[in-house]
Amino acid sequence: MFAPGFNLDLRGSASDTVFAPPQPVSLRLLDSARAPVVGAAVQLSTRGTASVSASADPTLLTYVAPITDAAGDARFYIGRFATAGAEWVIARVVVGGVTWSDSLEITSLPGRATDVVMPVDTAVYQGNTLQWRGTVVDAYGNARPDAATYSAGSAGITIVGTTITANAAPSRQLVRATVGALRDSAWLSIVPRGVISVRKDDNPLVGEWVYARMELDGSGFQTLVPHTSPAFLGLRSAHPAPWFAGGASLAFAIDAGISRVDLTGSITPLLTAPGGGRTMKCPQITPDGQMLYGHIDNGGAAPGTAWRWGVGAGGADSVRISPVAGSGGGVFDLCPSPAPDRRYVAMISNRGQIDFFLHVVDTLTGTTTQLPQRGFPSVRWSPNGSGLLVSAWNGQLFVVSSNGTGYRTLGDTPNYTSWASFSPDAAWIAVERNGPVIDLINVQTGLVLPLGFTGYMRMPEWRR
């Protein structure tokens, strides 16, 4: 017996798995004399965390408003979709200006376990431990309460419960997961120790980003420069932020010049581009922190020239690296990088040609040697002077000696951007891979350690 008023009645269980068949739901509308209200249109809506649909159409392809029959009854159907959780189905009827309403909670449970979602290419230092967490999910990604059992799929790690201990030197290790008959696996990177600066694109669609520092195992993330800071409205975020010696501050291209920014966000202007309409770009710093190299975007007749400045002299001792000859219209000398002895400087230049090639300048003799390798727009001299690291404009990362011999590609595929940085011992590089995401690559062996947690992090610079 229904009480006077508005009633909802679910015929069947309110809990079922996602994509269960549509379930019938009925309601009865009676007036205060317990007489049926006939021909009333029922307005249906849903609200909650799951995903369901309500309609008088049992196929749920079109919305049809249920109408109460001679008994005051109306039937409609609930269809479940891929998202598990709780959803409220709300029914409303307006009769004589009075709104009658009621609601029904529908719980959609995840379906059969089909996968274990695990951290992919996460990182840990040798000798450290981490807690491994995987989530058992159904075919639509809904989490289930099942717990996976983990085991080592390679010899460099040990696993007890969910605790993984990294025993091996930097390498890629395999973690296996088991849930009943379900098997899955994921990679773990044991990485060299180090700190990098990165630009993290928080919301690339609207240009929101921050510059930050972080350990290579993902710990110690610290925002250094938010894009919203008024002091950094002129920050040229298309260039990396290299570290000064000691790792207490970084160099940023801000407005027309170069400034030093410490780990508290304090700004100290260092250099101002000479003349109007010029900007300084692509700063690189010598290991002792005394000299800063970069190029000036002159605009007009001389679009790009390479320079060296004394950090403490405020640009008063500036030295032009670009050869004077051929530095006029259409010539770009980009991102100069000094050798450890500072006598030689590598840069990318077109030197009046269509393509950009690797060039090495002898600053004592003024001789410029064009090497056969093409690149764009940056080159890095290794800290031990052993060679040059270049990103070509086809996405290929390679190392080569300063005389053009010993060319060797790095990385799994030609899929890298222009920005890469050597570790202080020259054994590793950190590089931005298209995605963007950051990879670590061993210079000698070519071992690639992807850092899967660095999505939308760009332009890595290794702290000295």
Image (spheres, rainbow, N blue to C red):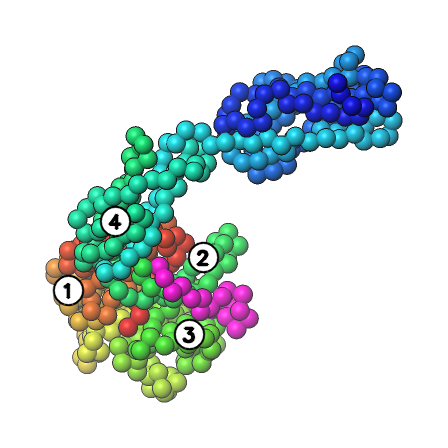
Q: Which residue is mark 1?
A: 401
Q: Nearer the viewer, mark 4 or mark 1?
A: 4
Q: Upstream in the sequence, badge 3 or badge 2?
A: 2
The 10 Å Cα crowd at callout 4, few under 14, some 14 to 19, many 20 or more, is many
Q: Secondary structure at mark 3?
A: loop
Magenta region, residue range: 218-236
Marking on residue 201:
2
Q: Which residue is mark 3?
A: 263
Towards the viewer: 91 or 180: 180
Q: CA distance from mark 4 to mark 1?
A: 43 Å
Identify the secondary structure beneath mark 1: loop
Q: Give whichever of discs 4 and 1 has the lower sequence position.
A: 4
- Which amino acid does the dot numbered 4 rest on? Ile
| CA distance for labels 2 and 1 | 34 Å
Q: Residue furthest left?
A: 405
Q: Residues within 10 Å of mark 1 (few under 14, many from 20)?
A: some
Q: Which residue is mark 4?
A: 159
Q: Amino acid at mark 2?
A: Asp
Tell me: residue 7, above or below residue 351.
above
Q: CA distance from mark 4 to mark 2?
A: 34 Å
Instruction: Say which amino acid is labelled 1.
Output: Ser
